[in-house]
Image: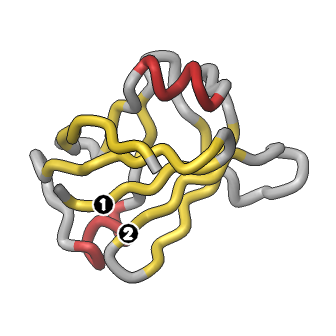
Amino acid sequence: MERYSAKSIDEMGRLVLHNELRKRLGLDAGQAFVLWHIGSIVILQKVNEDIDETATKMDELGRIVLPAEMRKKLRWNVRSKIAIYYVDDRMVILKRA
């Protein structure tokens, strides 16, 4: 597992994924993914949007939106620093830094 530098959550609950990480994962604007909240971490998993209707998408600037309910449970607020860990070509782990 490889750690990327921490990023901050903005006022709209968005988190920017590093450009290098997006390239490694093959993530482009509109790429579908699901977020899994497990304990104190969030798992971002790349999916085929046709398979999972709960999938959300990354925008053209590499931002993902972390749902308000998930942020509240994790106590991740605006400017919370989130560490990003590359697991494999389909999965990333997000954890408060």
- Mark 2 nearby-residue class (10 Å; few <14, some 14–19, many ≥20): some
* Residue 6: % across, % down: 21, 41
Which is nearer the N-term, disc 1 or disc 2?
2
Colour convention of the picture = secondary structure
For image coordinates 63% across by 52% down, the residue present is 45
* Residue 36: % across, % down: 54, 68
- Mark 1 nearby-residue class (10 Å; few <14, some 14–19, many ≥20): some
* Residue 74: % across, % down: 27, 73
* Residue 97: % across, % down: 17, 56
View extreme (bottom): residue = 39
Judged from the image, the secondary structure of the residue bearing numbered disc 2 is strand
Quadrant in the picture for residue 24: top right
Please determine whether, in this image, residue 60 is positioned above or below residue 5. Answer: above
View extreme (front): residue = 1
Q: Which mark is residue 41?
A: 2
The answer to whether residue 8 is visible is yes
For image coordinates 32% across by 37% down, the residue present is 4
View extreme (right): residue = 50
Residue with the mark numbered 1: 95
Please, what is the three-letter code of the amino acid marked with disc 2? Ile
